[in-house]
Image (cartoon, helix red, strand yellow):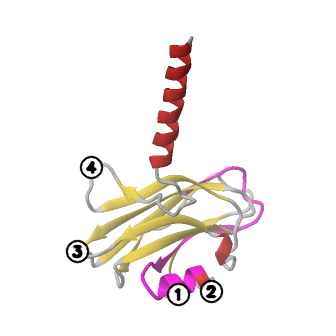
Amino acid sequence: MRRFRFLVTAAAASAVTALAALPSAASGQAIGPVQGSQAMVGTSGIAVPPVQRSEVANMIDAGTIDAEGYTHLTVNLAAEMKSPAVHQGVIGAVLIPDVHPFDLAYTSLGLLPASLDLTSPVAANGGLYTMAKQATLDVGFSRYRVLLYNTTGSAATVAFFAYRSRR
């Protein structure tokens, strides 16, 4: 019985350690490499409750994109609504420079400096899936933070991807 308790305790400790090592959207570290590509990064399964674009402090931090050495980012997002949209709105991603002093403006002042926006429209009581039109952006900073918002009045689960290129 003593050995069984030890095994259960050790297994629980291993599981906690493994979970702690996983990236977390809440900590802003959810964006990572996409298997099979060195240039593509992304994240999926991020819960985004209703948050207006003006509510900077409540936006969901999806993580950062390393853009050092790249000239363009081709970005896209897709979302699954958890219920039909209460009213017409958008699921959106805002990319802001994650370098000083822009990071300070965001964290200390709640500003969205030099932002790049990507949105996907959602109709009231429409379908449960939406995808933004892919956009290619010029890279002007070495790293970008991705913040998500949702103006539909209904919760959504979001996937965000970026393809980094040197063209």
Question: Which of the marked residues, 2 or 3, is nearer the chain's N terminus?
Answer: 2
Q: Are marks 2 and 4 in contact (CB under 8 Å)?
A: no
Residue at figure coordinates x 72%, y 53% from the top left: 84
Q: Which image quarter is the N terminus in? A: top right
Farthest top residue in view: 1
Task: Point out residue 123 in the picture as x, y percentages from the top left corner.
Answer: 68, 63
Task: Point out residue 45 in the picture as x, y percentages from the top left corner.
Answer: 54, 50
Residue located beneath label 1 in the image: 113
- Looking at the rendered structure, which numbered label has been put on residue 109? 2
In the image, is 67 to the left or to the right of 108? Answer: left
In the image, is 155 to the left or to the right of 26? Answer: right
From the viewer's perspective, is the residue at label 4 or at label 1 nearer? 1
Q: Residues within 10 Å of mark 2 (few under 14, many from 20)?
A: few
- Looking at the rendered structure, which numbered label has been put on residue 121? none
What separation in Å lies between label 3 and label 1 (alpha carbons)? Answer: 24 Å
What separation in Å lies between label 1 and label 2 (alpha carbons)? Answer: 10 Å
- Looking at the rendered structure, which numbered label has been put on residue 166? 3
Q: What amino acid is labelled 3 in the image? A: Arg
Q: Are marks 4 and 1 in contact (CB under 8 Å)?
A: no
Q: Which residues are magenta?
A: 79-107
What separation in Å lies between label 2 and label 4 (alpha carbons)? Answer: 39 Å
- Looking at the rendered structure, which numbered label has been put on residue 36? 4
**Camera-nearest residue between 58 and 133:** 58
Q: Residues within 10 Å of mark 4 (few under 14, many from 20)?
A: few
Task: Point out residue 92 in the picture as x, y percentages from the top left corner.
Answer: 58, 69
Q: Are marks 1 and 2 in contact (CB under 8 Å)?
A: no
Find out whether residue 103 is within the magenta segment: yes
**Camera-nearest residue between 147 and 74:** 147
